[in-house]
Image (tube, grey):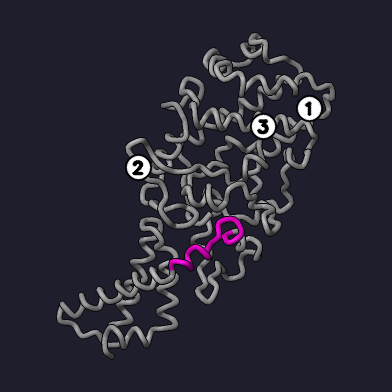
Amino acid sequence: MLHPVNRPDCIDALWLAVYIQEELLKLSLTLDLSDIRNLNSIFGTDTVSWLWKYKQKLIDPLKGFYSHTNSAEKNDILTAFRHDINYYKQYSDRTFTFYLQPKANLPSPLAAQVGGWFENFYDVITQKGFPASVSGYRCNINAQVINAETLSKNDGLYVCPVCDGTWMERTSTGILGSIDHFLPRSIYPALSVHPYNLLPICTTCNEKIKKDNDPLTYLHQRKLSETFHSYIQPARDSVQVQIGSSWAIVDKGVYPQNQLLIFPDIFDLPGRWQQDADEFDRSVRRRIRDSVDAKKDEGQDVDHNAFDRILLRLDQRLYEEWGGMGNSYPATWYFRWLCQNKKSDLLHEYTNG
């Protein structure tokens, strides 16, 4: 969303889980997977053992799909799945639409059953783990590993990629964080374990604010290309925060308005930042005062020109803190608004000039 994020290697290893989903669905067109011999015909021993261990979630739900008599419906679901998992390659295509949407009975009512099965993979992998013997990764993959490796792969990013606040915290029991399905798995089940759809963000953004709201339809209709995505199309360097009676995220006319509205619609931003305006004001004024006092302690006069240089250097320092310190992004825009609209007051307050 806001900040760019590098995908950790463990998330990319989940491509194999997507492949397993596709193969199981394809096999179930004609084979009953409750017969383990049918699994052995296509998967290795370790994969079959893992699938069988969680048979109730990963195998049994496909019985209804296998026994369904309308082969055309079943093939449509497989085709829809294959189409949807390639969405990340179509980000700039304004005509792209998702095919597998069980809540809309697409491509058929049978899709709801299959959609729940897709979602089971996420629950099993994040809670029980995706074995290294299956994925080929260096360790078992679960939610804790995804969170930890996202932190290590993004050295220097210590804030939530969405709200710029506290991201993940290390505790005695592990890392406290939340994995967001940018496109909710309840609506787009084909993306339940898709490497481009899993983004660790803060628990407030994911569980208290966004929940299952769909970035493509909630409050405003959007094309896939009209969203911001931390892996593909982050917003941070392309937009700015407009300070006023009602704060807004704006740009220079590059993006359509409904794309910019994704922030207030889905994450209540910058409204949440505006609530902290008093804290931003105290913080930036304190930093201005400290910078001026440092110059005076060095025996330097702080006239109008020197004050301008102090403000420019402070602006640069705030910018360099983006991603490294909580709320440095909105604080920077508040500082810039303050310099533009209250500069003479600041000059008089801190320099007596």
Q: Nearer the viewer, residue 118 or 40?
A: 118
Q: Nearer the viewer, mark 3 or mark 1?
A: 3
Q: Is residue 110 left or right of residue 36?
A: right
Element at badge 2? Answer: strand
Q: Earlier in the sequence, mark 2 or mark 1?
A: 1
Spatial CA distance of label 3 from label 1 is 15 Å
Pick out the residue farthest to the bottom. 353
Q: Nearer the viewer, residue 164 or 336?
A: 164
Element at badge 3? Answer: helix
Q: Earlier in the sequence, mark 3 or mark 1?
A: 1
Which mark is on residue 74? 1
Which mark is on residue 170? 2
Q: Provide the major secondary structure of the magenta segment.
A: helix
Q: Amino acid at mark 2?
A: Arg
Residue 328 image offset from top left, x and y in percent? 39, 63
Which region of the structure is painted magenta? 263-276
Q: Is residue 64 left or right of residue 164?
A: right
- Identify residue for label 3: 116
For label 3, the crowd category at 10 Å Cα-Cα, with few meaning under 14, some 14 to 19 and many 20 or more, is some
Residue 157 image offset from top left, x and y in percent? 39, 51
Q: Residue at x 74, y 51 (%)?
A: 95
Q: Residue at x 77, y 42 (%)?
A: 104
Pick out the residue farthest to the top. 37
